Structures are given as C-alpha cells and as structure tokens.
Amino acid sequence: MSITRSKSFRRAANPDVDLTTDNRRWQSITSSSGQQPYSWGLSEGNVDARLSLGLLSTLFYTDNVNFTTNDSKKTETIFEISPILKLDIGDPSGAIGGAESNQSEYYTSLLYLPTFYYHLKDDVDDYAQHFLGEVGRVNELSRSVLRLNYDERILASSENTMPEANYTLLEASALTDHRVTQRTTLRGKVAYRTISVAQAATSRAEWVGDFSMLWELSPKTKLGLGTELARIIYEQRMLGSQNYQQALIFLEWKPSSKIGFTTRTGMEWRHFDRQPPRSLMTSLVTLTTFYWQAAEKTRLNLRFRVSNQPSVVAQGALYREVRFGPDLIHEFGIHYYTTLECQVIRRRYDSGRLDWEPTSRIALGYRDDSDKANNRLNIELYVQWHRRERSDLLNATLERTQAGIQVTRYF
C-alpha cells in the first residue's frame, strides 16, 4: 500500500462552463481536477485508487446575517465546518489528446462535502450538502462524461450567497467531445436540472442541450460555432414555461503565454408560454474572459457576462443580467499570497425593476506548498462586502460586510 498522486494536468478548469454557471468556492477548493492532496492510495497496473480526507472550517463575523434592510439587520458570528471526502479511481482527466492522455482511459471521481453552520449568538444550527460525482472515459480521440451535481445554498454563509442564487440545485448531465480530425472537434452536452427554492412557486425544471464544432486555426487560435437549446418548466403551472435557442460563436486566442482571451457570444431567441401572452424576445448573450500574467507571481483575470435568467426572487419574472469584474492574485514567495475579487452586477427585470449588486472580497493567505497537489494546509484571512440596490422600492438597500478566517486542512 502506498500513497499515489495524479500525474495529470489535463483538467485545469470546468470543461463545460455555460452562460449561467457561477463559480462556487467549495468546488474550487476541492475540485474534480485530481490536483488535491491524497491521504491514501494504491496502484494496480495502470489504474490508481486515491482517497482525499480533509476539513474545511470558517469562522466569520457578519453585520447583516439575514441580508435585510438596515432597520432590521442583525449581527452574528458563525462557525462553519465541512468534512472533505474525495475518491478518485483512475485519472480524472478532462481534455483530449496530449502526451498524458493514455494514462487511464476510464475514471470515477466522487466528492462529498457536507457543511454544518453554528450561529454563536442566537444558538441556531443549520447544514447544507454538496456532492459532485463523475464517471468518464478519455482517450486520444474522445471524451465522455456522466456527471451528477447536488448543491444546497444558504444565504447566511461564507459563500456570500446572493438572493437570486439562494436555492438548491440538482443537475444530471452527459457530455462528449470527439476529435474528428487533428484540428476539428465536435462537442455535445445534455443536462437536466431542477432549481428548488423555499417559495415553491418559483421552483422549476430545465432541459438544456449544447452542441458545437471547434476548429484549431493555429496553435494560438481556436474558432467555433454552436447552439444551445433549452426548455424551462415552472412547478406552478400559472407561471407557464419558456423555450430559448442560442446561435453562438466561440473564440479562443492566446497570443503569448502571458495573455489569453476567450468568448462565447451570440443571439438568443426566447419564447414564452404563459398568461398573459408575451412576444418573442431577441437579445445578445456573451461570456467573455481575459487573463494577463503580468509577472511571474501576479495574474489578472477579467470576466464579462450577459445572460437572461428566470428569477427566484420576483415570482415568474425574467431578468437580464450584466456582470463584470476582475480578480487579481499576487504571490509573496512560496507560502504567502493575496487575492482581490470585485464584481458589479446589474439585473433588469421584465417587471421594470432594476437592481445593482456590487461585491468585493480581499484575502491574505498562507499555504504550505505552492503546488496544489501537495498543499495540505491553506489559511485565509478575508473581508468581503456586498450591497444590493432596488429601483422599485424606497429604503430597500441591503448591505453586508463579513470578516473571517478560513482554514483548509488535508490529512
């Protein structure tokens, strides 16, 4: 018996991000990339079985625990603790080809992370569960993945969950990539997801299909065409259903090792089946990212997104969301680093309501190893700020500041 480590670096990020994907901190800490430290493992031929055990704990103070208006806000100190259980069988890969792509053709990756919340002032307890499971196959020509994702989101948490993201997500998806020629790849994804909220009227089910073709024009440039189709069905029948189709163009451009640009941009046509009837809506949608490696230890990322989403706050409403924000990371030697994340969100609802939500987070961190596969201890001191302004109500501005410490420990 010996501890083994994944040698694959073919999966550095979520391979199937779409226009409505939000980054979740628990997934970034314990991603399915196979780069987290392992506690135990064994090898049998070319197949490895590896287990990660860890603990994620956070202690933070907030001046508005329930994210309410100033006349009713309450302060609170909250302790969160999350056991980390991660099992990899085979090599959790995510890309086609490359020198390493024949390591283990099949793989299974399972992550379970329950979170327990303890309110120290009001003696309130709560919990949420997070699960991410994958079964996949990858070789020189193709990649196929079956995925199950379950994520419970709580408003009063260190994740700083926004009201429009305060729901429980269950998603089952199947994804495939196939390299037709050396420079041409076909891609398809089908997903079924449910969005469940406390106010069941806005709970809904979604069927989504995503299909595209990508061409590698040069080692630095990829171009693609694709489409996304979806049907959205509300649990409450009076809210009806929605269908949309998107025609998309994809571009990946890396002029140098220090600069990169990607975009997924196109037109959306959305149909409504409800009373009173509503006409066809046509709009531009995009997800555009840019990164700049300013120095060896400094990296800047910019993200811009425009999308249309059903609201979980305003019953039956659709909002058009524009998001823009940078995040910056700078390393001080091997062990210390700092991060700065900022984001401005504008939501315009079809009811006429307009919301602005600026957020920011600054952190100072320590890690015992800069290599994620060997980093068993990570400590962050952070402060984050969140504000929401509404145009349709007076004295409806919400504001919250959190300050705390987060410790991730792998055994």
Image (cartoon, rainbow, N blue to C red):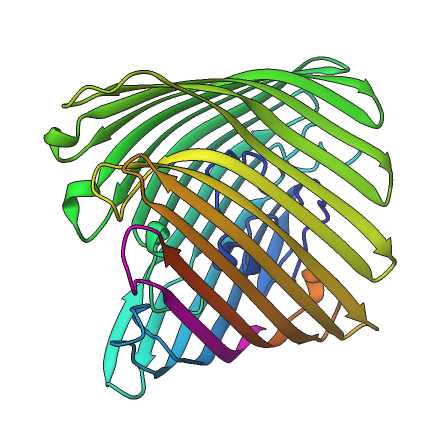
Residue 409 within the magenta-colored segment of the rendering: yes
**From the viewer's perspective, is residue 205 above or below residue 78?**
above
The picture places residue 97, in percent across and down from the top left corner, at 73, 27
State the residue at coordinates (53%, 53%): 344
Residue 268 within the magenta-colored segment of the rendering: no
Q: Quadrant of the C terminus?
A: bottom right
**From the viewer's perspective, is residue 327 above or below residue 292?**
below
- In this image, 272 relative to 219: left or right? left
State the residue at coordinates (40%, 75%): 80
The picture places residue 34, in percent across and down from the top left corner, at 61, 51
State the residue at coordinates (46%, 38%): 20
Q: Nearer the viewer, residue 388 or 76?
A: 388
Q: Nearer the viewer, residue 244 or 115?
A: 244
Q: Quadrant of the N terminus?
A: bottom right
The picture places residue 146, in percent across and down from the top left corner, at 45, 32
Residue extending furthest toward the front: 394
The picture places residue 186, in percent across and down from the top left corner, at 61, 16
Q: Nearer the viewer, residue 171 or 375?
A: 171
Q: Tell me if residue 37 can be seen.
A: no
State the residue at coordinates (66%, 76%): 364
**From the viewer's perspective, is residue 374 above or below residue 176?**
below
Q: Quadrant of residue 268?
A: top left
**From the viewer's perspective, is residue 245 above or below residue 73?**
above
What's drawn in magenta, residue-wise? 391-411
